[in-house]
Image: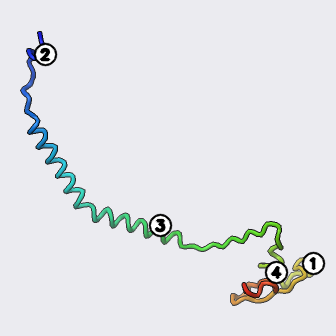
Amino acid sequence: MEVSDVPHAPHKGRSSMSRRRSFLKQLFAGVGALNLPNVLRLQSQAADRATANRRTSLIVLWQDGGPSHFETFDPKPLAPAEIRGALGAISTRHPGVNFCEVLPGLA
């Protein structure tokens, strides 16, 4: 018995299969196109929320081996002489914040 002699279902042909695939491609492309504005809007909103959450400022001053914070940015002017250090303190425009007298440009 040869392969061509085996009974099988009649072949519908490539044209019907091709038409169905083409129809499904167009259908899903249309559905995707209809949803595209919603997808873009949701992406934009997510990006705005992520940006809004990151709007914080931080300044890190790493002074390895330099003067201590008591002698620069936290002079403790009301502390006893043994703690506050030899340099004086100057006021900034923020109440209660003092810098060392050798940093007038930062105050």
Assign a secondary structure to mark 4: loop
Q: Secondary structure at mark 2?
A: helix
Where 26 sits versus 53, above or below?
above
* Furthest-top residue in this view: 1
Numbered badge on residue 94? none
Q: With respect to residue 10, does 75 lie above or below? A: below
Q: Are marks 2 and 4 in contact (CB under 8 Å)?
A: no
Kind of residue at disc 2 = Val
Tag shown at residue 75: 4
Residue, disc 3: 50
For the point 80% across and 74% down, which residue is it?
69
Q: Are marks 2 and 3 in contact (CB under 8 Å)?
A: no
Query: Based on the displayed image, in which of its 4 quarters is residue 10 positioned?
Result: top left
Residue 87 appears left or right of 29: right
Task: Name the residue carrying label 1.
Answer: 82
- Amino acid type at circle 1 is Glu
Mark closer to the chain start, 1 or 3: 3
Q: Kindly report the distance in space between the C-alpha atoms of the residues bearing marks 2 and 4.
A: 97 Å
